[in-house]
Amino acid sequence: MAVDCSIRIKNLSFGYNESPVLRNISLELQRAGFTSIVGPNGSGKSTLLKQISGILKPDQGSLEINGADMNAISKKDIARIMAVVPQNTALEFDFKVMDVVLMGRYPYVNRFKGETQKDREISIENMKYTNTYHLRDRSFNQLSGGERQRVILAQALAQQPKILLLDEPISHLDLQHQIEIMSLIKKLSIDQQLTVIAVLHDLNIAAAYSDYIVMMKDGALHHQGTPVEALTAENIQQVFNIDVEVEVSASTNKPYIYAITRNQIKKNNVRVHVICGGGSGSDVIPILHNSGFEVSAGVLSIGDLDWKISKDLDLKVAEDIPFTKISDEAYNYNKKLAMSADYVVVTDFYIGKANMRNLEIMLEPELAEKSILLLGSEEIHQRDITEGAAAELYSRITAKGFAKAVSREEMYHLLNKAGAENE
Amino acid sequence: MNKALKNYSILLILLACLAFAVVMAVGFGAVRIPAREFADVLFGKQTENSGILLQIRLPRVLLCLIIGAGLAAVGAVMQGIFKNPLVDSYTLGMSSGAALGAVISIVTGIGFSIGDISTTGVFAFIGAVVTLFFVYNLARNKNAVAVNSLLLAGVAVSYFLSAVISFLMLLNHDSINHIVFWTMGSLSLTSWSKMAMAYIVIAPSIIALMVFARELNIFALGDESAQYLGIDVEKLKKILLVICCIIVGVVVSVSGTIGFLGLVAPHIIRMLVGSDNRKVIPYSALLGAILLIASDTLGRTLIQPVEIPVGVMTSIMGGPFFIFLLRKQRQ
């Protein structure tokens, strides 16, 4: 039997001392299930929860529960429909766990008769459900954070609510207890057909447990929908102003969010053109890029590892079709990029007939004035698959001073020095 | 089973102690009256000392009983409301406010009396309410009331009001004895009618406070959580505080300011039975009665024929206890 419980918020606005906290919020939550409210700090998500729970009254707009206006329902009746689990509960005066759970029966208890056997039974049942029955005679304040939160959950369930509100219920807990509490709440939303509304900090926890996500920013609703619909990289960028990658699990259809850590790269305005290929530039290109150089690359075969890396970093690349001799077009673009650079680095790639022109370019008279740094000239024979032609070219280049043969370390050292001078 | 026995045993011990305290209190004094004679008088016999017993000692001891009970219950309830064991009518300045109200009614002659019952109690009540309102708003920052600020404001206001009372004393030499009585707390001017009035007001007030014990327990979860459970927290706080002010007003009007009782009694009871206000309020009331009867008896008899005002006695004992609580809380 499904006891559906609807919450309807219409054009709700609210502010503390004139400054608006919630702006014109309209939201409808129709059936049992797990809804998470997410958003950055100060987005008004906890305030929205306080509106739903009736602690705060809206300045404008209306809030209905099961079709009845919130203001028309007595506080005790609200407590029978809705229970709230706060962030963290500590008692100023210590009580036994059993007594704390029994407090949840307050909306049902007659002032003069006291708690009945039924109240006790309901409390005990919910303690068993939340795995706190064994703690019943312990003092509440001596429990761990996770145990306390389970006891408060048992108390909330003793209210026999249709709606359960949670205000960052796990933010003070360690990972194990976070999962424990969230799984329990998820189970509740299914077993007891509860309408659960939780304010959550962690997007991945929200994604994993929620049926529905409401995203807030600056007191307004931004996006809502299923986790897959709402938690897109674009929406997260808009609401949280962070770059993320979202991967949707094929088996569960739940999104998983990774933060992309983009280091703030300090540009130094020194241009370096890297002639590479076959992965020989896969270290050089990102390192130079991250050190702040303006990097370009060429001539690279489309699909090659170095090509991919350069494309990912949005660099200028002279590219050509793989396994064919470098075309004039690609060669000339490569030359153009090399000419506009302050330094040219030629890495230790394998040289075959197809990419011979990546070496020949060093002989161009127009590049005579450029500092060309040549890597790996010692073991050229191992990389030469042109039957000696490449090796011969190498020795000509180095002998005549077209390029300077250096090790990787020397290259980085030279370039970093140039970069530092230019800053 | 064992637990139930333990709870009952504490109640029984408290009741036994109270009975013992009453018997001892009526027995001690300038004239030593044995318990047997007291029993005879209670059963209507005329004895040598029946006049002293019935007209002087018994009303005084019974007044002590209800005042002690009232102050301790007020302490327990206010600690529940503000969720801090250092709060009571004395530390929040309510007692001083009530005393000032009483003094004003005397020096200005606004008050009138019917027999022994005067409107001084009403002025004391108003003084307590106004002071509490003032202290509360002084400590309030937007909607939050930090208990530290509340206590500081209470103590500061309390000093200020005491100074005003002293100043009024200087201006009104005629009624100085009368006023000293309010600042030190004394039960030497007891009569049956005063005692009766105290019972008529205080006893139902204590019962009214006990009715809200369950809500007070829930207050320990915090105001917000209490609201989630369906309690109109602000309204209930007002109701409870008004009842507290009524008790304090009547107590002060018949006995002056008596300090620390509301602090000591609930604390000891909580150590014995835990924090459940359904026990803490009535048990504290019983212990408060015992402690006040004991303090008054000691005050009357320690350095005869001089009578030490009961407020001085409770402060001598309660002050160190308050410091002990402060230190313990800091740890």
Image: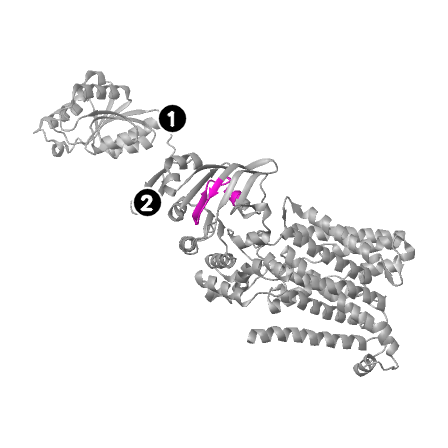
Q: Amino acid at mark 1?
A: Glu
What is the basis of the colouring in this image? one colour
Q: Quadrant of residue A297?
A: top left
Q: Between A46 and A139, which is closer to the camera in this rendering?
A: A46
Residue that label 1 marks: A423
Q: Is residue A89 left or right of residue B189?
A: left
Magenta residues span A27-49
Residue B27 higher or lower than A392, as above or below: below
Tell me if A328 is positioned left or right of A75 in this view: left
Count of all numbered marks drawn on residues in the image: 2
Is the C terminus of chain A in the top left, top right, bottom left or bottom right quadrant? top left
User: Which image quadrant: the N terminus of chain A?
Assistant: bottom left
In the displayed orientation, state which residue is furthest to the top.
Answer: A366
Residues at marks 2 and 1, CA–CA distance in whole angstroms: 48 Å
Q: Which residue is mark 2?
A: A253
First along the sequence among labels 2 and 1: 2
Q: In the rendered structure, the residue with mark 1 lies on which chain? A: A
**Residue A390 coordinates in the image, percent (x, y):** 12, 27
Seen from the viewer's position, the closer of residues A4 and A49 is: A4
Q: Is residue A401 left or right of residue B327?
A: left
Instruction: Tell me which chain the residue with mark 2 is part of.
Output: A
Could you tell whether A285 is left or right of B195 in the image?
left
